[in-house]
């Protein structure tokens, strides 16, 4: 349950835009694996890289970006979450809702790794990157 509480705390802080609290939850050498085709997609190592390449874009490029978690599953060494993303892309004004599963690995109470699985096509549509 401690792992789930760590991840819930991170999502609560993200919703409040309390990035200092999130930084405290991340291992300094966090491995963040964002889906290619998703904003900030690719592998990012370290807290500063995650904020620069991933988190900064959510506030700048999206209106009302949020992640809603429906279920948490503790794996012993981390947590899987199932939920959906929602938001409106600033440039196009198009909204989207995309289901996701994310894996978090937790070591010594810190989030050490993130792996994302989501439908990047729906997000690309909202961003105007695909033909409809």
Image (tube, grey):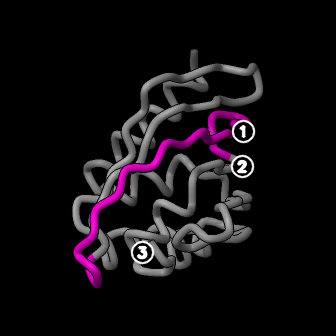
Percent of width and height locating residue 88: 27, 65
Q: Specify start and end residues of the magenta stretch as a single range.
A: 90-111
Q: Are marks 2 and 3 in contact (CB under 8 Å)?
A: no
- What separation in Å lies between label 2 and label 3 (alpha carbons)? 19 Å
Mark 3 is surrounded, within 10 Å at the Cα level, by few (under 14), some (14 to 19) or many (20 or more) other residues, namely few
User: Does dot 2 land on a helix, a strand or a loop?
Assistant: strand
Closer to us: 18 or 55 = 55
Q: Kindly give the residue lying farthest to the front in the view shown.
A: 132
Upstream in sequence: badge 3 or badge 1: 3
Closer to us: 12 or 68 = 68
Closer to us: 101 or 96 = 96
For the question of whether residue 106 can be seen, the reply is yes
Residue that label 3 marks: 56
- What separation in Å lies between label 3 and label 1 (alpha carbons)? 22 Å
Residue at image coords 62%, 71%: 37
Q: Are marks 1 and 2 in contact (CB under 8 Å)?
A: yes
The quarter in which the N terminus is drawn is top right
Relative height, residue 103 to residue 24 (above, below): above
Percent of width and height locating residue 113: 72, 49
Upstream in sequence: badge 1 or badge 2: 1
Residue that label 2 marks: 113
Residue 100 belongs to magenta span: yes
Residue that label 1 marks: 105
Residue 79 belongs to magenta span: no
Upstream in sequence: badge 2 or badge 3: 3
Closer to us: 21 or 96 = 96
């Amino acid at each position: 349950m401690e792992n789930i509480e760590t991840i819930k705390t991170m999502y609560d802080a993200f919703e409040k835009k309390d990035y200092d609290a999130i930084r405290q939850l991340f291992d300094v050498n966090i491995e963040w694996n964002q889906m290619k085709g998703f904003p900030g997609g690719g592998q990012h190592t370290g807290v500063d890289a995650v904020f620069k390449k991933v988190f900064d874009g959510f506030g700048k490029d999206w209106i009302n970006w949020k992640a809603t978690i429906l279920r948490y599953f503790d794996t012993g060494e981390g947590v899987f979450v199932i939920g959906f993303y929602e938001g409106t892309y600033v440039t196009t004004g198009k909204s989207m809702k995309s289901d996701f599963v994310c894996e978090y690995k937790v070591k010594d109470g810190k989030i050490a790794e993130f792996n994302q699985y989501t439908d990047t096509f729906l997000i690309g549509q909202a961003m105007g990157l695909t033909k409809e």
